[in-house]
Amino acid sequence: MNLAVIPARGGSKRIPRKNIKNFNGKPMISWSIELALESKLFNDVIVSTDDEEIKAIAIKDGAKAPFLRPKGLSDDHTATAPVVKHAITELNRLGLTYENVCCIYPCAPFLKPCDLKVSLQFLDKGFDFVYPVIEYAHPIQRAMKKNSEGIMKFVQPIFELTRTQDLDKNFHDAGQFYWGKSMSWLADKNMHSLGYGLEVPQWRFVDIDNYDDWRRAEIMHEILIKT
């Protein structure tokens, strides 16, 4: 059995009520809920939240919200893994057990069902976790810093004269979803260092941290859903 957990706390700071703010016609979290249901990969889709309004929207959209997340797991410093572990534990207490658990972030409007399906295949090959990664647009080996006088210095001077095409590729977490074995979540295994990285295209990634990011994401999303 497969479970989808969508973590959505109510107290976002940089964009207030971010998880249920209107995004191209519907609450942001609705896109993730609909995606999870559309994929037909999950026996249950649940939303882990500390917020009654988010809970009501989740249920209206077809997800389940069988518990409210405790405040101790709902602040600015709470990591993803403890929230997923809490959800699995609470569902176990209700007599529900799952082999695989996918954490899908509520602000992932560019995620596609095919990403979830392809990544699940790698999880079935024996990896503890699978998650999407994006290649850095420019080689990080040629990163520079600026001193107080405005002079630029290479962080790694050894690569100053190296052609960019000769440098190794580097990636970062796309921050959209994490497939994991239920036992791996419960055992507090490191989802990043023990995970398989599924490469996804850069044009389907926007890190929505402020209102400029939000508007750019809306414009991109509106174009994509019309094509």
Image (tube, rainbow, N blue to C red):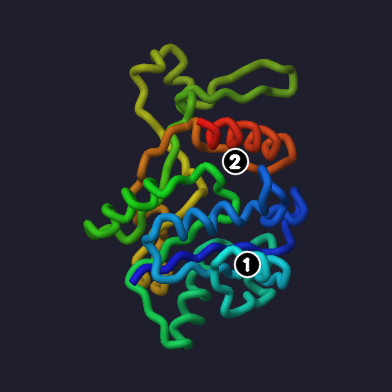
| Residue in view at x 43 percent, y 61 percent | 102
Instruction: Residue 19: give x, y in percent of width and height.
Output: 67, 56
The residue wearing badge 2 is 207
Reading the chain from its start, which is encountered first: label 2 or label 1? 1
Vertical position of residue 99 compared to residue 205: above or below? below
Instruction: Residue 133: give x, y in percent of width and height.
Output: 42, 42
The residue wearing badge 1 is 60
Depth check: 96 or 223 in front?
223
Depth check: 220 or 192 in front?
220
Three-letter amino acid code of the residue under disc 1: Lys
| Residue in view at x 59 percent, y 19 percent | 153
Vertical position of residue 113 compared to residue 188: above or below? above
| Residue in view at x 47 percent, y 61 percent | 103
Horizontally, residue 15 falls left or right of residue 178, namely right
Q: In which quarter of the image is residue 166?
A: top left
Instruction: Residue 145: give x, y in percent of width and height.
Output: 61, 25
Whole-number angstrom distance, CA of label 2 to CA of label 1: 27 Å
Instruction: Residue 90: give x, y in percent of width and height.
Output: 51, 81
Vertical position of residue 137 compared to residue 129: above or below? above
